[in-house]
Image (cartoon, grey):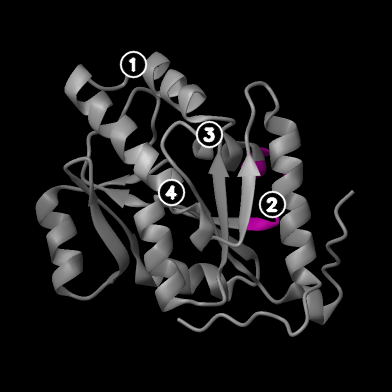
Amino acid sequence: MSQYNEFNPLLRQPLLIVISGPSGAGKDSVVDQLRQMTTRFHFVVTSTTRAPRPNEVNGKDYFFLTKDQFAELIEKDEMLEYAIVYNDFKGIPKQQVRDAMATGKDVIMRIDVQGAETIRQLCPEALLIFLTVESEAELERRLTIRKTENIEDLKLRIATARKELQRMDRFDYLVVNPEGELEQTVATIMAIIDAEHHRLPHRKIIL
């Protein structure tokens, strides 16, 4: 059972939590499971210029924007971080994160490795969790069976994932997500978050 105590003011101060890692590691599945099991978190929704995949919902999975809309946010300095990922833009609007932190809930951001490193620079006290799988071979297998890209895009995604695995040492925690063990993976992440709430001195996020 979680040790979170909403009546303890020390434990109530929200954390900014980044869940990142290579494509195929299961970030979406982990975040969906967290959504289903508790209302304790506020989940920041990433904006992207890529087309939605089947069953993806605008405003829930991503905010799907045109490149002109995304460019306008950049020009107004309204993006906390953004990058070109597989030929499309992805990023986090600043105001969405500010509003989320004001709720008093822990705030979870599901972003790519490049974006996570940007958040580390902007918010050094953010909690960065690197999600991965047992091996590069398993990662390649998962990316291949998804069948969401053509051959060229798949090769690019696999090559990028391999590079991202080399950057895990820039994160606070490493969590392996084995096939068929999603509940245990999520339990590990919850335990990490609970432990961070008991850290002294307590983290403070200023955006």
Instruction: State the residue position of label 4.
Output: 166
Marked residue nearer the N-terminal end (2 or 4): 2
Marked residue nearer the N-terminal end (1 or 3): 3
Residue 36 is covered by the magenta coloring: yes
Crowding near the residue tagged with mark 3, few <14, some 14–19, many ≥20 C-alpha atoms within 10 Å: many
Instruction: State the residue position of label 1.
Output: 147
Crowding near the residue tagged with mark 4, few <14, some 14–19, many ≥20 C-alpha atoms within 10 Å: few
Image side of residue 183 versus residue 41, left or right: right
Q: Amino acid at mark 1?
A: Lys
Marked residue nearer the N-terminal end (4 or 3): 3
Q: Position of residue 190 (x, y in %)?
A: 74, 51
User: Does residue 171 appear in the picture of this structure?
Assistant: yes
User: In front of the other: label 1 or label 2?
Assistant: 1
Residue occupying the point 37% across, 67% down:
118
Instruction: State the residue position of label 2.
Output: 39
User: In front of the other: label 3 or label 2?
Assistant: 3
Crowding near the residue tagged with mark 2, few <14, some 14–19, many ≥20 C-alpha atoms within 10 Å: few
Instruction: State the residue position of label 3.
Output: 26
Q: Position of residue 46 (x, y in %)?
A: 37, 52
Figure check: 160 above or below 94: above
State which region is magenta.
34-41
User: Which quadrant: the C terminus?
Assistant: bottom left
User: In front of the other: label 4 or label 3?
Assistant: 4
Residue occupying the point 39% across, 50% down:
112
Find the distance from the CA under tag 2 to the CA under tag 4: 33 Å
Find the distance from the CA under tag 4 to the CA under tag 1: 25 Å
